[in-house]
Image (cartoon, grey):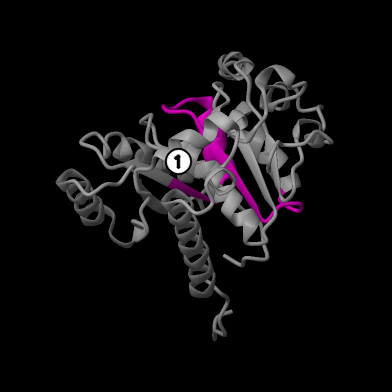
Amino acid sequence: MDLSQSHVIAVTNQKGGVGKTTSTINIAQALSALGHSVLVIDLDPQGNATQGLGLRLDQLTVSAAELFRDPKVADEAGIYAGNGLDLIPATPLLANVEREMIAITNSELRLATRLRRLRAKYQFILIDNAPGFGPLMNSALNASDSVLVPVDSSYFGLAGIQKLMSEMEIIREGYNPCLSVLGFLLTLFDTTRMSDEIRDELKSAFGDLVLKNVIRRSVKLREAPAFGRTIFQHAPGSTGACDYLQATQEILARLASRSEATAPRLSLVSSTQGVANV
């Protein structure tokens, strides 16, 4: 990837409680701190990423639900602007919209259409997804360049990954042939034997796709969302902040190396509302 170009990352795993939202908002904040323009899209009707970035659900006038439901709604109407980190929020209404999408032709391509326009404004767009599969998840995969998969370091940490890989293959065979796995990010990592075994098993299955940096289990990481803050705002000197910064730097290095590997070579054949504390 050319880091001067926009890149859309879906953060997803069909298993809940693996740190998808925590990873989305903290990697987004780290990217912003490193000088990149960033948009976070919350596609979980629970709105955890929205609240984790300091917005109250009852204060929202336009959200992802309205953008999905009505293509005529302007993109900017659903963007809540912060300092280098913007947000398209989610509310419980998004669950109703997802059910409606089943009966609408090409509804799973509406997000991709909007993001083609928004790419010119942001270097990175991160999409936080709810657990499980459905129209919203497919919308995110259709709109993304790559997928980041948080995996918690537990017995069930690998559950569902093969299903996600199968779902990605379906998307590649259809609308988005260039969709790829950016990496697997181990979360809730500790010094137990179980964490080491999960890491070894993941590496055995996916090799270098497993990020070298892990996110250690942290009380501060659990606390931060309650204050509507990222870890960098809540506890900038904590292990959680250090881990997410290092993971983000590794992601950037990985994207840069992909760009170099795929660079053309000579050949003989030719809104006005603010995100709190962002």
The residue singled out by tag 1 in the image is: 220
> x and y percent of residue 56 in the render?
67, 23
Asked if the magenta segment contains residue 261, the reply would be no
> x and y percent of residue 138 in the render?
51, 33
Q: Is residue 118 above or below residue 54?
A: below
The stretch in magenta equals: 119-148
Side of 108 where 198 appears, left or right: left
> x and y percent of residue 51 in the render?
60, 28
Q: Is residue 265 visible?
A: yes
Q: Is residue 237 above or below residue 100?
A: below
Which one is in front, 199 or 164?
199
Q: Is residue 176 visible?
A: no
**Image quarter in which the C terminus is found:** top right
The residue that appears at 33% across and 42% down in the rendered structure is: 188
The residue that appears at 71% across and 52% down in the rendered structure is: 122
Three-letter amino acid code of the residue under disc 1:
Lys
The residue that appears at 60% across and 56% down in the rendered structure is: 31
Which one is in front, 2 or 17?
17
